[in-house]
Image (spheres, helix red, strand yellow):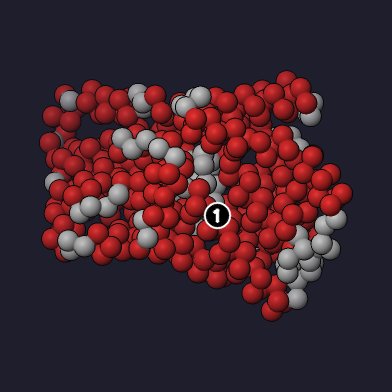
Amino acid sequence: MYYILTLGLIVLLALGIPVGKALIISGLAGYIVNIGAVSAWVNAGVISQKMTYSLMNFLLLTIPLFILAAKVMNGSSITKKIFDFANTSVGFLPGGLAHANIFASLLFAGMSGAAVSDAAGLGRIEIESMKSNGYDAEFSAAVTAASSTIGPIFPPSVPMVVYSTISGVSVGKLFLGGVVPGILMTVTMMIMVVIYARKRNYPRMPFPTPKAMWVSFKQAILALLTPIILLAGIWTGVFTPTESAVIAAAYALLVSFFIYRELTLNKLFIILKETARDTAGIGIVIAAAAFYGWVLARSGLTYQFAQWIGGVTQSPIIFLLIINVFFLIVGCFLEAIAAIMIFGPILYAPAIALGVDPLQFGVVMVLNLMIGLLTPPFGIVLFITQNLAGISFQKMVKAILPFFIPLLTVLLLMTFFPQIVTWLPNLMQ
């Protein structure tokens, strides 16, 4: 049963089976081995119940709404206005457009909550602009891929919503807990760009005049207000984190329809179809992961794993370092939402028992899994940016390697200094 649940899942993923289907197939096979084919048939209703109940959570309503908000912004000029403002703000630094790429990802993160939305929407504009201004395709793709991981760390964040459903930790606190790590990711990646820019003599923009800065800011102000409205509303209690998703989607529609007047009914219909498709895909993964995790728990493997970790160390730091290695490996094979649903409940209890702050544990887990989006063989952001840049997957992997340095640096800082995550939520209690 252990081999079916672990190696079976890895083999199915290696064969290119979608994550949701791979989880269902391996989980069902393990379930049949556990109780027998006849009993599995008689108790088939349990399977559907486990999958259905996993989706009956009010917090999950935020996922389609944040996806809708991101797609509406990508479907209008909001995304381009964000990039133009970022370019005006930091383009004067060595390797200017690369800095604009990273800064724009931080700004867009305050609206989308998903790395894939950042890479697919904002990434197209960023890569095309960098290539047309003398940056090589590999570097352009690497910066775009690495900076897209800021999206699920800086609020709002779809993976943190999922973590909240399995841990009970406040979504509002998780959102606030990602602010400082998101800024640190931005700064460390910009330092890496400066090193590259000086070595390769990449161009930079002239220092902006006050007039140019004002014009750029004025054009982007409506988009830049989104994260401010969301964070201020959550902090002051005007609306809940779940309601903030409604605000984000409604605000994006209002700006795109009535102010910029770029969103037509035909475009909106396409966006709604894409939102429904993406939401259904995430829902299947969540339901399949819940069933797979339940079978995993029945097998006793989760208990043994938790016991083993508890026996290895009583130090919260050593525990988190082990977890970091574990999730970095898991992230190479399994997408973030599935990994959180399966392994979050297993590791949450021993983490709390060892005194790890649940806020710190959640943000550390999410960052690990975001790094997994950049790792072969299944890093989806690698495939997206490689396709946008028109380069081979091998070149994409080689180009992204240096950017693991700033990402892992922030991960280690969060591991050793929990205040990086907990300071802002505690300050705003």
- Residue 303 appears left or right of 336: left
**Taking the image as drawn, is residue 23 in sight?**
no
- The 10 Å Cα crowd at callout 1, few under 14, some 14 to 19, many 20 or more, is some
Residue closer to the observer: 178 or 48 = 178
Whether 262 is drawn above or below 292: the answer is above
Amino acid type at circle 1 is: Ile
- Residue 190 appears left or right of 100: left
Whether 121 is drawn above or below 253: the answer is below
Whether 50 is drawn above or below 223: the answer is above
Quadrant location of the C terminus? top left
- For image coordinates 13% across by 54% down, the residue present is 307
Whether 261 is drawn above or below 358: the answer is above
- For image coordinates 33% across by 41% down, the residue present is 341
- Number of numbered tags placed on the structure image: 1
- For image coordinates 39% across by 55% down, the residue present is 419
Circle 1 sits on which residue?
183
- Please, what secondary structure does the residue beneath circle 1 have? helix
**Residue 27, horizontal then vertical, whole percent:** 26, 40
- Residue 351 appears left or right of 310: right
**Residue 152, horizontal then vertical, whole percent:** 50, 46
- For image coordinates 77% across by 49% down, the residue present is 84
**Residue 49, horizontal then vertical, whole percent:** 26, 24
**Taking the image as drawn, is residue 370 in sight?**
yes
Residue 56 sits in which quadrant?
Answer: top left
Residue 131 sits in which quadrant?
Answer: bottom right
**Residue 179, horizontal then vertical, whole percent:** 50, 48
- Residue 412 appears left or right of 193: left
